[in-house]
Image (tube, rainbow, N blue to C red):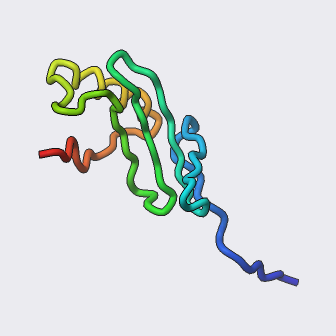
Amino acid sequence: MPVALLGPPPPLAPPLDILRRSPVATDPRRQIYAFEEELEDGVLRISWDADDPEQLDAELRAPYYDRRLPREKVPAFHRAVKARLAPLGPLPILGADPRP
């Protein structure tokens, strides 16, 4: 006899094995997963939100408060991101550097 299970569906699995749960102190229900790696110019952070599973964010956290990352350092950041996302195959880039 089939049994109906009540409750929310199980959470989605993150798209990469390197992503680990990153609790959100203000909302423990949020399912955010992240990966951080120290690079020469800052910290590469890749994050994924189970509430928006089609989007994967990559950012370089560096102390550049009054300017952008120097142009000659951008290719190294792109190479690091591509290396970490390679298991997913080619992905579209929906936006880059939203600062004006």
Describe residue 62's horizontal placement relative to residue 29 as left or right: left
Instruction: Residue lying at the far left in this picture: please name it.
Output: 100
Q: Is residue 99 above or below residue 85?
A: below
On screen, residue 40 above or below 15 = above
Residue 65 is drawn in which quadrant?
Answer: top left
> In this view of the protein, which residue sits in the foreground, 34 or 26?
26
Q: Indicate the quadrant where residue 44 lies.
A: top left
Q: How many marks?
A: 0
Q: Residue furthest front?
A: 66
Residue 21 in picture, x, y percent from top left: 60, 46
Residue 10 image offset from top left, x and y in percent: 66, 64
Q: Residue furthest right?
A: 1
Q: Residue furthest top?
A: 40
In the displayed structure image, the side of residue 75 where residue 59 appears, left or right: right
Side of 37 relative to 91 (left or right): right
The residue drawn where x is 16% and y is 18% is 72
Query: Could you say where residue 78 lies in the image, as x and y percent from the top left?
Result: 28, 28
Q: In front here: 67 or 97?
A: 67
Residue drawn where x is 57% and y is 46% of the image:
22
Q: Quadrant of residue 57?
A: top left
Quadrant including the N terminus? bottom right
Percent x, y for residue 46?
43, 39
Q: Residue at x 34, y 40 (%)?
A: 90
Q: Is residue 88 left or right of residue 98?
A: right
Residue placed most toward the observer, 27 or 46? 27
Using the image, determine if residue 12 lies above or below residue 87.
Answer: below
